[in-house]
Image (cartoon, rainbow, N blue to C red):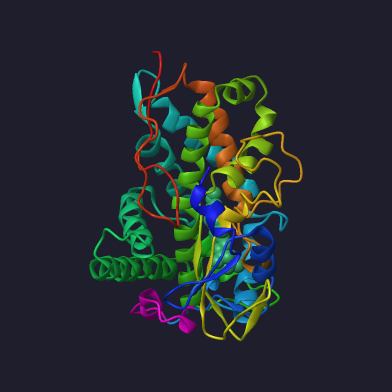
Amino acid sequence: PYPLYAELRKTPVALQEDGSYVISTYRELTAILHNPHLSSDFRNLSHPLAMSEGRTTPAFINLDPPEHDRLRRMAMRHFGPPHTPGLVTGLEPALTDTVGSLLDGFADKEQVDIVDEFAYPFPVRVICHLLGVPREDEPRFHRWVDDIVNSIDYNPETDPKEKAENGVRANNELNQYMSGLLEQRHGRPGEDLLARLANDDGPEGRMTDDEIVSTAHLLLIAGHETTVNLITNGMLTLLRHPEVLHRLRNDPGLVVPLVEELLRYEPPVHIIPWRAAYSDITVADTVIPKGARIVLMLASGSRDPQRFHEPDRFDPDRQDNQHLGFGSGIHLCFGGPLARREAQIALTELVRRLNRPRLLTDPPPYRRSPVLRGPIHLHIEQNT
Ligand code: HEM
């Protein structure tokens, strides 16, 4: 039930010793996420990744309007829905095939690790497919994503200098790789996202190469670990609620509200730690001064009893479920439709194909990060 969040919510806007402000209640989080003076620009924050060598354009998740809006719109045009015919709609067969072939590997196994053998490889394969990355290069993406995600974690047990160095190195290698791939796409229109971004002129023109590389990089980082955790948290929650697992097996349509409830109850993104006040911002009668860092406790907002009835209960029949799992406001997750569909297909098929699954370790080992929450491994046992 996350008792720390309940404690934090007693002070909705809390000043910390380091001068940052922590926001933990639903109402205040929603208000600040829609405040035009809330900045996402790394350059206002002196973050090590902001200075990453060879990258002159920050990705749009780290930009403010008007730059953010222009790049988001240009990328969105190809990403659909509702911008159909978009890539996500066309991805449906690839999603089903990928899930099917990963689950074929489970057939004769009594024990499986849902993370290593399924939830981890699935989204990276989808994003590589979307971008047009050849299958044989996928393993390199795993390492880059790991190093980058670790470098933006808050894990107090790891050496921050080493993490930052690894993160910067992985960023540079990934950008270099993407630039090479983009080079091959110029003048060759095609279906993958890089080819579309490189060759299609929209109403706002074309992105520069640097902007395309930043955008591709963003999709990979934002869409990987998060989706892994949604699927893994989902399977864990189902195994802890066997009556819901049973219902899902008999009624696959339940998966749609179930994934929504997961995004509220066990969200992959707990905290957005990198916002800043562009100028003074007033929330809940507190003035957050210009330049202060703002930490958004999204997962706490989604468990706020002032907004959700019995928030600590997992209830896939919940109505009015406007959770903060994908954030809110102008940076609302761009990949929501894809992530939802990936998780819906993954959970439906896991439940359909696993034979009497049982958890081997509860709780499973977790990634030591308060920002991205999910198990590192999820070992389960099944009848063969
Ligand atoms: C933004 C969560 C999957 C691409 C965000 C934000 C959250 C989030 C909380 C807001 C960040 C902020 O306000 O600073 C998630 C979760 C996912 C997921 C929980 C999976 C379950 C994906 C996928 C993609 C993606 C699959 C794309 C392939 C993005 C992008 C942004 C974003 C590009 C930045 C949007 C902007 O700045 O306008 N995501 N995400 N996400 N997400 Fe996701």
Q: State yes or no: residue 48 in magenta.
A: yes
> In this picture, is 284 found above or below 370?
below
Q: Which residue is rendered at x = 35% and y = 79% of the image? A: 54
Q: Which residue is rendered at x = 54% and y = 75% of the image? A: 40
Q: Residue furthest right?
A: 320
Q: Position of residue 177 (x, y in %)?
A: 35, 65
Instruction: Name the one closer to the observer, 108 or 294.
Output: 294
> In this picture, is 1 found above or below 188?
above
Q: State yes or no: residue 39 in magenta.
A: no
The answer to whether residue 91 is seen in the rendering is no
The picture quadrant where one finds residue 73 is: bottom right
The picture quadrant where one finds residue 245 is: top right
The magenta segment is: 42-55
Q: Position of residue 231 (x, y in %)?
A: 50, 40
Q: Which residue is rendered at x = 39% and y = 70% of the image? A: 179
Q: Position of residue 230 (x, y in %)?
A: 51, 44
